Amino acid sequence: MFTLIEKLYLLRLLKAQSRRRFFFFRKKDPSHDRLVEKLEQMIRNEQVNREQL
């Protein structure tokens, strides 16, 4: 399992990679978007759970 800091780092890397692809007009992989969404959801959930504890 990843820590919150590691998840934030991975999300930042994935978003940077998608911006790079935009400049080279490459086709995006659909799994890339799903992974970004899942990471964002995991981060939100962890932040909410921390506030409640």
Image (tube, grey):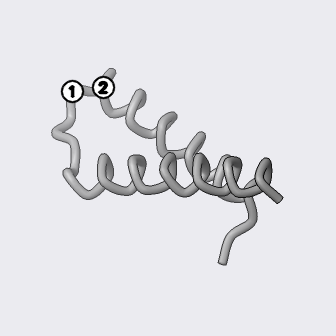
Q: Secondary structure at mark 2?
A: helix
Q: Quadrant of residue 19?
A: top left
- In this image, 22 relative to 18: left or right? left
Tell which residue pokes out farthest to the top in this image: 23
Tell which residue pokes out farthest to the right in this image: 53
Q: Amino acid at mark 2?
A: Phe
Q: Quadrant of residue 24?
A: top left
The N terminus sits in image quarter: bottom right
Q: Secondary structure at mark 1?
A: loop
Instruction: Kindly identify the residue that appears in the image at 30 percent across and 47 percent down.
Output: 33
Return the x and y of residue 11 as percentages of the image width and height: 56, 46
Q: Nearer the viewer, residue 15 or 45?
A: 45
- Crowding at dot 1, Cα within 10 Å, few <14 / some 14-19 / many 20+, comes out as few
Q: Nearer the viewer, residue 38 or 23?
A: 38
- Crowding at dot 2, Cα within 10 Å, few <14 / some 14-19 / many 20+, comes out as few
Return the x and y of residue 2 as percentages of the image width and height: 68, 70
Instruction: Kindly identify the residue that appears in the image at 21 percent across and 42 percent down.
Output: 28
- In this image, 47 relative to 22: left or right? right
Task: In the rendered structure, find residue 22 and report the number of the disc placed on it.
Answer: 2
Q: Give the mark count.
A: 2
Instruction: Kindly identify the residue that appears in the image at 70 percent across and 48 percent down.
Output: 47
Task: In the rendered structure, find residue 25 and report the number of the disc placed on it.
Answer: 1
Do the residues under discs 1 and 2 have CB atoms within 8 angstroms? yes
Q: Nearer the viewer, residue 8 or 20?
A: 8
The C terminus sits in image quarter: bottom right
Q: CA distance from mark 1 to mark 2?
A: 5 Å
Q: Amino acid at mark 1?
A: Phe
